[in-house]
Image (cartoon, rainbow, N blue to C red):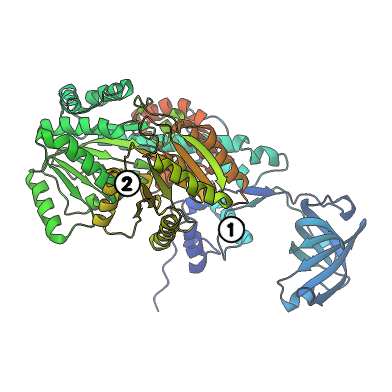
């Protein structure tokens, strides 16, 4: 019988299944946490700590405090009222306490026999029955001398169902033993102060008695600061590596942007703002280079980002290349296509729209036109990612609402153009974030900001009202529309479901038609056919419909200057940035506009804070900054963005100020110590090589 092959030597790159105590089921649960290798285990850091180093007597216990107790069992019994539970009365030198177990095995009652000793950890509450612990963790012995206390703070890790803390702790201990044999973890990282990586990890997985829980909770511990710097440096390195590698590829030189700006402006009834012109100058400089432009344009709702993109696209087409814009939704893609057709048709430029709704015959014809180079401008959705989409002369790629797409998706579009040339990339975002944060999250991009709204935009007055005042809101809509203006009513639901949202919108539209029979009420939701949505939105834009009921698809797409009031139902369920995006649909004319945030009481503290900010500010940068503080970067920036490097300990909001000194260090390491740079990228990013081959 052949011998079973010996397991490979354990390294940080080894799969966790080779660690003792990690069978297939445990490995599957670890994978749910993003843990696949020994290194992943090392970097799975505690979310908090428990202090199990000292015993607290029952008489000294504060209500709601957490701690360790050691006591002798006096009595145990099972009671069935009001709920079945195992009740264990225990005693130490200072008094008694009650342990209550609602979920227990019969042998636990046998184990907790009178006279035995128990050492437990839990939260003690002062109740009518005295000091009570519900489901403490505990161990049982025949004498008090059999117990030992923990020598260090006990880590509590993020986990998933079926993966207990003791198992996680034992696996992390084994991972630390593997790391102790890894020479790379002993090597210093040039330019970063504090304990070395392995020493810092040891301190965080096994904090000693001298470590303060308060410092750890505030992320002020030297070991935390050391690893935060290392992770942020790895983030900068990975994105800068992508940028440097991408910009080594040739790109088309596109000039004459000023002439394109003049040509497009001639057909507009308004002038570009100073901020738009400044950003176009920055874009024009990039397009003239023979390396790919990588530029992010941030601007508030209505700041005119699309027009800036249109000028750049016109310059590309006039230089003999094609330009493509990718939007996250079909509705937004359709809106962009309509705008471009209006602007480009007088200049003799054809615009092609490519979405998933096209019939095969229409799609095949559009693809043939693009491949032959006959269509100068392409607008589409995720459909652009598909392999058969090829543009003969793609020179410029514009990505709208970039936070909906990940870096990897964006890079996947780099080969859509002609062989040997990489298209320039212009990325737009209506979710403005502070520059320090943008430099952290978008380290691979140059950043431009349109920080000026077009003249004539009147600030929107925002009020929050309880749903109990719904009839007052109906009456207000009637008054506004009687004055010749128009209104939106936006329906939202907790559960993201086209079907449920469609039902909610249909029911609301029926209520409004009954309450306001004098008005023409339109309806738009995600389950409608494209042509039906188009007809409803066109009717609203042309003024044939006074009131448009819609789901959050209306967040983008419709520009109706005559609309002066928006009602957002269940506003407490939405994030600040989405509320601000929706509000941006009104206030586009010269008449003062209103946004009514209807909420269902009672409000949570976070919901109350969000609605308060909406009432106080129309500034998208202020709102985005507050949204970051309330919800964190994962929700606002998109999980694909923040998930790029795992963000195991660093926080792009909390730690943004640390980035400035790490950026020159990243450039220095890439230039003089690429081996160190790769090691850090591999350690913190892990899957970097999957999309780093640019």
Between 355 and 194, the one lying in front of the other is: 355
Q: Is residue 39 left or right of residue 287?
A: right
Which quadrant, please, contains the C terminus? Answer: top left
Residue 205 visible in the current orientation: yes
Is residue 378 toward the left or the right of residue 179 in the image?
left
Residue under the image location 74 percent in, 52 percent down: 52
Quarter holding the N terminus? bottom left
Number of callouts: 2
Residue 200's disc number? none
Q: Residue at x 31, y 31 (%)?
A: 304
First along the sequence among labels 1 and 2:
1
Q: Is residue 462 above or below residue 182?
A: above
The correct choice, above or below, for 187 with respect to 257 in the image is below
Disc 1 crowd, CA 10 A, few/some/many (<14, 14-19, 20+) = many
* Mark 2 crowdedness (10 Å alpha carbons): few <14, some 14-19, many ≥20: some
- What x and y, as percent, mark residue 171? 57, 57
Residue 44 in view: no
Q: Quadrant of residue 459?
A: top left
Query: Where's residue 519, x and y in %?
Result: 37, 50
Foreground pick, 372 / 149: 372
Determine whether the residue tagged by mark 2 lies in a helix, strand or loop.
Answer: helix
- Disc number for residue 168: 1
Percent of width and height locating residue 231: 48, 38
Helix, strand or loop under label 1: helix
Considering depth in this image, is 458 or 359 the residue closer to the camera?
458
Residue 339: % across, % down? 23, 39
Q: Which residue is mark 2?
A: 408
- Work out how far the residue at label 1 is from the one at label 2, CA to CA, in angstroms: 31 Å
Q: Are marks 1 and 2 in contact (CB under 8 Å)?
A: no
């Amino acid at each position: 019988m052949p011998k079973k092959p010996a397991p490979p030597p354990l390294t940080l790159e080894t799969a966790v299944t080779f660690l003792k105590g990690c069978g297939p089921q445990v490995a599957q649960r670890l994978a749910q946490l993003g843990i696949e290798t020994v290194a992943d285990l090392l970097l799975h850091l505690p979310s908090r700590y428990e202090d199990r180093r000292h015993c607290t007597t029952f008489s000294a216990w504060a209500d709601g405090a957490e701690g360790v107790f050691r006591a002798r069992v006096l009595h145990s019994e099972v009671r069935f009222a009001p709920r079945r539970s195992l009740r264990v009365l225990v005693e130490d030198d200072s008094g008694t306490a009650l342990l209550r177990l609602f979920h227990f095995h019969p042998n636990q009652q046998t184990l907790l026999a009178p006279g035995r000793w128990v050492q437990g950890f839990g939260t003690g509450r002062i109740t009518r029955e005295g000091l009570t612990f519900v489901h403490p963790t505990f161990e049982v012995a025949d004498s008090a001398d059999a117990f030992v206390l923990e020598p260090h703070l006990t880590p509590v890790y993020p986990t998933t169902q079926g993966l207990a803390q003791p198992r996680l702790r034992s696996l992390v201990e084994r991972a630390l033993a593997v790391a102790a044999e890894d020479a790379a973890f002993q090597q210093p990282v040039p330019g970063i102060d504090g304990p070395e990586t392995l020493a810092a990890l040891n301190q965080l997985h096994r904090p000693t008695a001298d470590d303060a829980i308060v410092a750890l909770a505030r992320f002020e511990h030297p070991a935390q600061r050391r690893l935060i710097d290392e992770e942020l440096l790895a983030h900068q390195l990975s994105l800068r590596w992508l940028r440097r590698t991408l910009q080594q590829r040739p790109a088309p030189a596109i000039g004459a942007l000023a002439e394109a700006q003049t040509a497009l402006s001639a057909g507009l009834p308004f002038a570009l703002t100073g901020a738009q012109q400044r950003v176009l100058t920055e874009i024009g400089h990039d397009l003239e280079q023979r390396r790919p432009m990588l530029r992010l344009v941030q601007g508030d709702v209505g700041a005119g980002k699309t027009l800036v993109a249109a000028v750049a696209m016109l310059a590309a087409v006039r230089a003999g290349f094609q330009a493509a814009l990718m939007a996250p939704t079909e509705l937004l893609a359709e809106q962009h296509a309509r705008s471009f057709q209006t602007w480009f048709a007088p200049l003799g430029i054809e615009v092609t729209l490519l979405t998933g709704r096209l019939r095969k015959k229409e799609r095949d014809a559009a693809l043939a036109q693009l491949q032959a180079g006959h269509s100068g401008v392409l607008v589409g959705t995720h459909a652009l990612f598909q392999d058969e989409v090829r543009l003969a002369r793609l020179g410029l790629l514009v990505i709208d609402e970039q936070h909906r797409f990940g870096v990897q998706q964006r890079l996947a579009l780099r080969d859509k153009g002609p062989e040997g040339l990489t298209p320039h990339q212009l990325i737009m975002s209506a979710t403005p974030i502070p520059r320090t944060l943008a430099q952290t999250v978008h380290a691979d991009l140059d950043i431009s900001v349109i920080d000026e709204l077009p003249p004539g935009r009147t600030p929107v007055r925002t009020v929050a009202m309880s749903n109990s005042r719904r009839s007052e809101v109906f009456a207000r809509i009637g008054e506004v529309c009687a004055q010749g203006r128009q209104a939106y009513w936006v329906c939202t639901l907790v559960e993201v479901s086209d079907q449920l949202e469609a039902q909610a919108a249909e029911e609301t539209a029926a209520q409004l038609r009954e309450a306001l029979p004098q008005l023409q009420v339109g309806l738009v939701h995600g389950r409608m056919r494209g042509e039906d949505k188009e007809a409803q939105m066109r009717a609203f834009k042309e003024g044939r419909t006074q009131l448009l009921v819609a789901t959050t698809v209306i967040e983008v797409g419709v520009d109706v200057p005559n609309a002066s009031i928006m009602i957002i139902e269940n506003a407490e369920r939405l994030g600040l940035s989405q509320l601000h995006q929706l509000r941006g649909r009104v206030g586009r004319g010269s008449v003062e506009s209103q946004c009514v945030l209807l909420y269902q009481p009672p409000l949570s503290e976070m919901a109350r804070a969000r609605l308060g900010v909406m009432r106080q500010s129309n500034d998208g940068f202020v709102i985005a900054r507050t949204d970051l503080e309330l919800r964190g970067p994962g929700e606002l920036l998109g999980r694909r963005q923040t998930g790029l490097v795992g963000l195991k300990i660093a926080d792009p909001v909390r730690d943004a100020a640390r980035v400035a000194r790490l950026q020159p260090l990243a450039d220095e390491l890439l230039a003089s110590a690429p081996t160190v740079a790769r090691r850090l990228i591999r350690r913190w990013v892990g899957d970097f090589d999957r999309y780093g081959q640019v």
